Image (tube, helix red, strand yellow):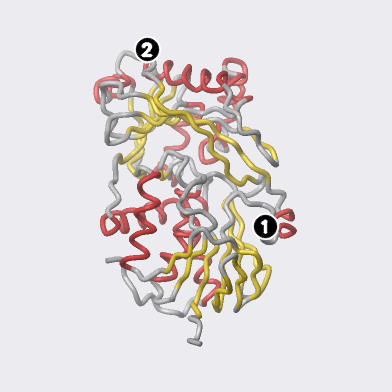
Amino acid sequence: MSRQQQFDLAIVGAGIVGLAHALAAVRRGLSVVVIDRDAQANGASVRNFGFITVSGQERGQVWRRAMRSRDIWLEVAGPAGIDIIQRGAVVVARRPRAVVESFLQTEMGEGCKLLEADALNRDYPGLAGQEFAGALWSPHEVRVESRQAIPLLATFLAERQGVEFRRETAVRRVEPPYIETSRGIVQAGKVIVCPGDDLATLYPDRIAHYAVTRCKLQMMRLADPGFRLPVSVMSDLGLARYAGYAALPEGGALRRRLEAEQRDALDNGVHLIVVQSADGTLVVGDSHHYATTPDPFASERVDEIILEEFSAVFGGPVPRVLERWTGIYASAADRTMFADAPHEDVRLVMITSGTGASTSFAIAEEVIEELFGATMSQTMKIA
């Protein structure tokens, strides 16, 4: 009988969090196997905007992680064949722009600028003719097509970085150096578990300690509207929701006004993000509803609230809805992520804020460094 291969690292979960850890590991010369129960990416990692958001992320460590993750997306996109479809973001203020002006005075506002209403109408045809108090323009964001980018990243890791993938394989127990799976034993010196929104299979007691629940969102794809958006677009519902804006002193006044004017939107966790795909169609959303087991049913009223905000920002008739879907991700009220250590050679990593695309790469670098040691040199480059 041949000797079974032992990997330096096994990663449970092939969503963006797992793939980010695989990338960070192979860049340090580690041998990596990724194990996933599904045949392909099917969860939150592909049911989103592909919007790597920097401005608006929680001030401090989360914002810095988003900046670093954005840089890694730009490094890996070309070699992996991932198209950067849009760059930058515009957050329009339909109400007084005090939050935007305050944000620009912080360190997070570096490189950003205030757009006056006339410039916004002139330079962004899709927004022409609308009445705005102004807008925040940020150069930091990039946008990929998630349902294409995640498979391309996995293929790049497998074919050009030597990562082994074992799909349609459930992990039943983790006891390093052995990982018991539905297809036999895998051997690895260390293990990183990236369970997405699976709260029950591995380390449920550790996950419960962080009071993790689930968040359901609703999104749509709209037909090509006939204009082109060079940037992703948000509205001031986002200024009241994203912590990097909402935590500013002026955020409270904006939220009180929104409570009076758009109570339904706040009650359903609606804020507007609009991104455009290469074929001209628009991905629009989203909403937020929380439950341990969210129901699978999409609410027509919630979609109407999202489209009402779309119409208020872009004017004119709403393009035809081509697709509708829901997504589910792990959520915790008091933290954006955690990296728990149920064993000295195991890390349990969950992003609990819907910021996987925006922060995973930086988080993965931190976890790999902590697990394998800061002195280990990075011996491999993206190529």
Residue where numbered disc 2 is placed: 317
Sequence-wise first label, 1 or 2: 1
Horizontal side of 310 relative to 211 (left or right) equals: left
Q: Nearer the viewer, mark 1 or mark 2?
A: 1
Residue 35 visible here? yes
Q: Pick the residue in front: 141 or 352.
A: 352
Residue 283, position in %: x, y?
Answer: 40, 31
Q: Pick the residue in front: 102 or 36.
A: 36
Horizontal side of 341 relative to 131 (left or right) equals: right
Q: Is residue 278 above or below residue 213?
A: above
Residue where numbered disc 1 is placed: 201
Residue 185, position in %: x, y?
Answer: 58, 74
Q: Is residue 175 above or below residue 231?
A: below
Residue occupying the point 66% across, 68% down: 173
Q: Is residue 365 above or below residue 275?
A: below
Q: CA separation, marks 1 and 2?
A: 46 Å
How many residues crowd mark 1 within 10 Å: few (<14), some (14–19), many (20+)?
Answer: few
Residue 139, position in %: x, y?
Answer: 32, 42
Q: Amino acid at mark 2?
A: Pro
Q: Pick the residue in front: 83 or 10.
A: 10
Residue occupying the point 51% across, 18% down: 304
Q: Amino acid at mark 1?
A: Thr
Q: Is residue 47 above or below residue 240?
A: below
